[in-house]
Amino acid sequence: QFNGDSLLSLTKNLKLLFNCEEATLFALDEPKRELFTKNFHREGFPEIRLNISVKNIAGFVAATGKPINIKNVKDSQELSQYHKQLTYDSSWDKKLNKDTTSMIVIPLPLSKKLVGVMEIINKKGGLSFGQDDFFKAKAIAPIMGMAIAKLRDKKSSNGESPTQERQMHILSQMIHSSDNFEDLLKRL
């Protein structure tokens, strides 16, 4: 179970941090070998699920544990550098009326175990993400892994304890209020 407001707040602040059009946090559904997100609940999609497979980008990152920075998701040559079967499924772009071009996709660990995947999508201004963006994403991955785990922990009847709710609020505010990335890392 995800708390939708906490997820929305986190992804909104990730968009500000990375100056990007979209940020998505996927959680791992281990028994089904799938990733799922409720990021787009307000856009009419209660849940999006992806197989953990080398055939899709988020699934590839979950399967291999390798973070990737893709300049153009539609460039099959670029994708084949990661894996010969890797492709980009544009069906969600059509459903959500979006046009994904560039992505940073990072595995989210908690205690050295995969709990989810973070996607940072389309740097504003039509640019691709640089190495500094890639470094930032990898640096905050453990914190986002902890956030995913907290969002999924069900401690009370509404799915979230007051302490967890407060921790998620603090994390979201820290991301939002940091002047620069170094300040954010220190505060985290």
Image (cartoon, grey):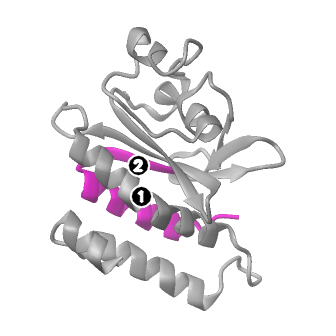
Q: How many marks?
A: 2
Quarter where residue 103 is shown: top left
Q: Nearer the viewer, residue 152 or 106?
A: 106
Q: Residue at x 38, y 29 (%)?
A: 100
Q: Nearer the viewer, residue 81 or 6?
A: 81
Q: Is residue 45 above or below residue 109?
A: above
Q: Is residue 25 visible in this depiction of the protein?
A: yes
Q: Residue at x 46, y 28 (%)?
A: 93
Q: Position of residue 12 (x, y in %)?
A: 36, 60
Q: Residue at x 40, y 9 (%)?
A: 77
The residue under label 2 is 23
Q: Is 68 placed left or right of 146 in the picture? A: left
Identify residue type, mark 2: Ala
Q: Position of residue 126 (x, y in %)?
A: 19, 31
First-in-chain label (1 vs 2)? 1
For the record, the magenta segment spans 1-26
Identify residue type, mark 1: Thr
- What's the mark number on residue 11? 1
